[in-house]
Image (cartoon, rainbow, N blue to C red):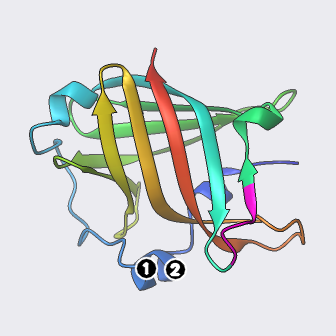
Amino acid sequence: MRVTLVVLVAAAALAAACGGSDGGSSGSPTGPSGSSLVGTWKASRAEFVGVANPSQRVEIVSLGVSVTLALQGGGAYTLTIAEPNLPPEVATGAWTASRDVLRLTPAGMSWSHEFDMTLDGNTLTLLNATFEFDVNGDDRDDQAKLNMTLSRM
C-alpha cells in the first residue's frame, strides 16, 4: 500500500462540492485557538471512513504509516506522510482556525479541508474532513472522511 499526498489532497471539485471552501483565504490563524495549536503534532490514529458506506474504514497508522502535522505561527502548515521503506511525502499550505474548526488550504488551491476540532491539553482531535481514499480496496478512490487523533511532539 502506498499512501500518497494525492490521497491527502482531494480533487478541487470534490472539496468544493462538499462545502470545504474557505474562499481562498490564507494568512495567520484566527480565533482563540490559533496560538495554542502552533507546534508539531503526530497522529496516533488516522482513519478514513467511507461516505457511502461508513462501515468501510482504513486506519493507516496501525498499518505503519506516520502522519505528522506542523502548524507554524505565521499560518503555514506542513503535512508529512511516511510509510516504512519509502521516502516521505510532504504537502504544504496555509491553515486557519476558529474555536472548533481547523482549515488546511493546500498551496495553490482555493479550497480547504475543514476539520471539526477539539483541543484537550496536548491532544488534538480532527474529525470529518472530506478526502479521497480507497476505503473498500478496489484500487479506486472513494469519497471519505478523515478522522485523526494527534499528540503534540
Mark 2 is on which residue type? Leu
Compared to residue 60, the image places residue 6 above or below, namely: below
Q: Nearer the viewer, mark 2 or mark 1?
A: 1
Magenta-drawn segment: 53-57
Write the residue at 70% across / 74% down: 142
* 10 Å crowding of disc 2: few (<14), some (14-19), many (20+): some
Q: Amino acid at mark 1?
A: Cys
Which corner quadrant of the image does residue 136 belong to? bottom right
Closest to the observer, 48 or 76: 48
Count neighbours of disc 1 (C-alpha within 10 A) and say few if under 14, some if 14 to 19, many if 20 or more: some
Estimate the spatial distance between the alpha carbons at disc 2 and disc 1, rounded to whole Å.
6 Å
User: Is residue 56 highlighted in magenta?
Assistant: yes
Secondary structure found at label 1: loop
Q: Nearer the viewer, residue 108 or 9?
A: 9
Q: Residue at x 71, y 35 (%)?
A: 61
Give the labeled residue for mark 1: 18
Q: Residue at x 53, y 50 (%)?
A: 147
- Return the residue at label 2: 14
Task: Tell whether label 1 touches label 2 (CB within 8 Å).
Answer: yes
Q: Is residue 1 left or right of residue 118?
A: right
